[in-house]
Structure formats: C-alpha cells, structure tokens
Image: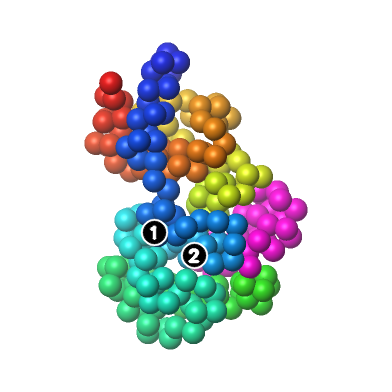
Amino acid sequence: MGTTDTKDRRVKALLAEAGTTYADEAGIRLADTPAPLWQLLVLSNLTATRIKASIAVHAARELFDAGGGTPERMADLTWQQRVDALGRAHYVRYDEGTATRLGECADLVRARYGGDLRHLARDADMHRDRVEELLQAFPGIGPAGARIFCREAQGIWPFLRPVLDEKALDGAGRVGLPKSPAALAELVGGDDLARFAAALVRVDLDKELADRVKAAP
C-alpha cells in the first residue's frame, strides 16, 4: 500500500482537495441539534437514490431554501412545493415519490422522536448498528441511506466512528490506501473522519480527482 510517507501525503491531499463533507456542500451546519440532524436525514434520503451526488446536494439546498429545513416546515410545504423544489435541482424521475416520502419522514420524526433525532440515538443506546436499523424506518432510507447518514454524522456523534462505507473503501483502494476501516481510521484524527470519508467517496466517483491525489507532491 506504499510507504508511510506516501500514505501521509495522500491523506493530506485528500483532505485538501476533497475534504468537504456532503452536509457542508448542502449548506448544513452540522451540529447535535434538531434542525441540522433533520437536514442530514433529508440529504441522506436524496443521496441514497440512484442519482448524481451533486444533484442530490442541489436538491437538498432547494428544499431548505423553500422552507423545509425542519420537520415542521417540511410538513407545512405542499406536495407540489416539494416537487417544484426538486425540479429546480433537476432531481428528475424520482421527484414525485421523493416529495411524498419526505412528507412522510417529517410526520414520522415528529411522531416518534418529537422532531429531534437525538432521541433516535438515545433509543439506539448509542450503538451504530441500532442507529442504522432505526433510520431504516424512515421511507426512502434503506441500508445505503442509513450508512450515508452515519458517515456524515460521525463528525458530531463520536460513538458511530469509524464509518467508512463501501464507496469510501473503494475510493481508498483507488488512491492506494488500505481498504480496511480500522486501518483507515488510524490515518486521521477522529474529528477528521467525516471529512476523510467524504473525500474517499469523492475520489471513488471522480477518477481525475483520484489521479490528482496520487500525484500530489
């Protein structure tokens, strides 16, 4: 997998070139508070669909700009307003079903957790497997969506760490880093794991970016 110096250089290049989390890109100021956790759930729902990540991020921004940044305000949006917001982001083919699911998610998070996903973490006894299981009760959130949520949320929920999903591991292999979550987690500090995981996903999706990282001086 290369020398320690090579690994260190590539990790630094990854964080510098691609270390923006998808939550940050979507304008989510991620914190352990109700509104940003809800916004992360929306982003995870959008990203889990077979659509470009950039379109999913744009769709999340449009929904938040339309007022859907909390469960209450998402529920207040009409179905057509949600469809229109998704359409502005070119989130096509899935817009109508997604608009319905997001309304259902807003209803469920209010009914089950009082609008606060911190209660989900508590119900899961701070165990990642249980968090992923509970997340999958939300319409549109399957195993992939639950893992996306946890991958981003590990920045604020340390008990989830390390979360390096299949796409992140594939990205690690593409830039010559170990494809083991435990080994990768040793390459950065815990507070950088979410950024590192996002960077690895980005190089998996972008060969030119991966080549730049490998060529970093």
Report which residue position mark 2 lands on.
39
Q: Amino acid at mark 2?
A: Gln
Quarter of the image with the C terminus in it? top left
Does the magenta run of residues contain 67? no
Give the magenta part as a residue range.
116-142
Disc 1: CA contacts within 10 A as few (<14), some (14-19) or many (>=20): many
| Residue sitting at x 57%, y 46% | 154
Mark toward the start of the polypeptide (2 vs 1): 1
Q: Position of residue 118 (x, y in %)?
A: 66, 61
Q: Secondary structure at mark 1?
A: loop
Q: How many marks?
A: 2
Q: Secondary structure at mark 2?
A: helix
Q: How many angstroms separate mark 2 from mark 1 (CA)?
A: 9 Å
Q: Nearer the viewer, residue 47 or 62?
A: 62
Q: Are marks 2 and 1 in contact (CB under 8 Å)?
A: yes
In the figure, 117 relative to 181: above or below?
Answer: below
Q: Position of residue 105 (x, y in %)?
A: 55, 72
| Residue sitting at x 47%, y 58% | 29
Q: Position of residue 56 (x, y in %)?
A: 36, 61
Image coloring type: rainbow
Report which residue position mark 1 lands on.
26
Residue at the left extreme of this rendering:
208
